[in-house]
Amino acid sequence: MLDMQLLLNEIAAELNSHTDRGKVADYIPELAKADPKNFGISVATVDGKAYSAGDADISFSIQSISKVFMLTMALGKVGDDLWKSVGREPSGTAFNSIIQLEQEKGIPRNPFINAGAIVTSDIVLAGHQPKETIAEILRFIRGLTDDDTIFVDKDVAQSETDTGFRNRALANYMRAFGNLQNPVDEALGVYFHQCAIAMSCTQLAKAGLFLANGGINPLTSEKVIPPIRVRRVNAIMMTCGHYVESAISPLALGSPERAASAVEYLLSCQEKHPLPSGHLDLITMATRSLADWHWKCWFKKQVGMFSAVN
């Protein structure tokens, strides 16, 4: 039988021995303050078990992982009408690229590139004030984790607001095509604050459990979304979760996942789903942890959610 805690301890110990810690994101100044020595890893299972190693309880801004939760909320609000405003295809370009928006009349390729995430933020915002929407997002994520300590890192949110020039360009461009319904500053205010939500690996793994459990939150037994929407969210995580690497990642990993700039990963493991060994781009500590994970693990039941941060 797989000893999950022993496995995580081995991964954390091995990765902590690496001197190449990668480079922290610095395009948002506040993110550049992150300690590159931090490494945490956490697994939450659908039967209520949780395993962690390393710095798994240190909070960090979840950045683009927030897009998974915003996609879930947007689908809950407008259903399949969402796909009139944002696509479901890999972009093949950088997460903040503006190139395709002109050719495709302001419709972003998918909800995980920045332009697409701004659209989902705009949809969740509809009919509310930004502060109300941010509070709603926090309630949703706190409900997923059954944890009221999750918060918005105001310093990160302010840093994103002060330097989000490219995101303003994306939003104004989409507004010009009629694909944003709210004022640009309001939609971006929601977007910047959702990215600044601070969570630990342990909290993040629990928050994603509904995606490994048919849309039911196993912590509270509440229905989050219907199974058909779980399949769609997982499918988009698999095909679009890594921006320019999205074509490679499903072949290597075979699991729905979402990467962010910290570096952070959120990965969903489904029933009787083996995680194969395969070629991965070993640029960061987090991808090394995934490579080690895939080599050692063979899951024989529903496992749940894996999160790691470097």
Image: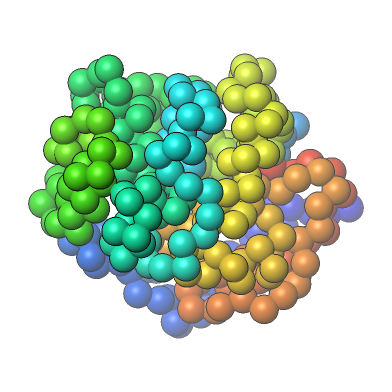
Q: Is residue 298 above or below residue 200?
A: below
Instruction: Measuring from the top left, give residue 264's x and y in whole percent.
Output: 46, 57
Which quadrant, please, contains the C terminus? bottom left
Where residue 29 appears, x then y in whole percent?
A: 18, 61
Q: How is the image coloured?
A: rainbow
Q: Residue at x 41, y 68 (%)?
A: 93
Residue closer to the observer: 164 or 120: 120
Up/down of 56 relative to 226, above or below: below
Judge whether residue 79 can be spotted in this image.
yes
**Looking at the image, how many numbered discs can be counted on the residues?**
0
Residues 274 and 229: in front is: 229
Residue appearing at x 32%, y 57% in the figure:
101
Displayed quadrant of residue 118 = top left
| Pick the front one: 232 or 11 | 232
Q: Is residue 38 visible?
A: no
Instruction: Name the residue rendered at 37%, 48% in the picture.
Output: 107
Residue 3 x, y percent position in the rendering: 79, 54
Query: In the figure, residue 205 lies in which quadrant?
Result: top right
x and y percentages locating residue 45 in the rendered image:
70, 39
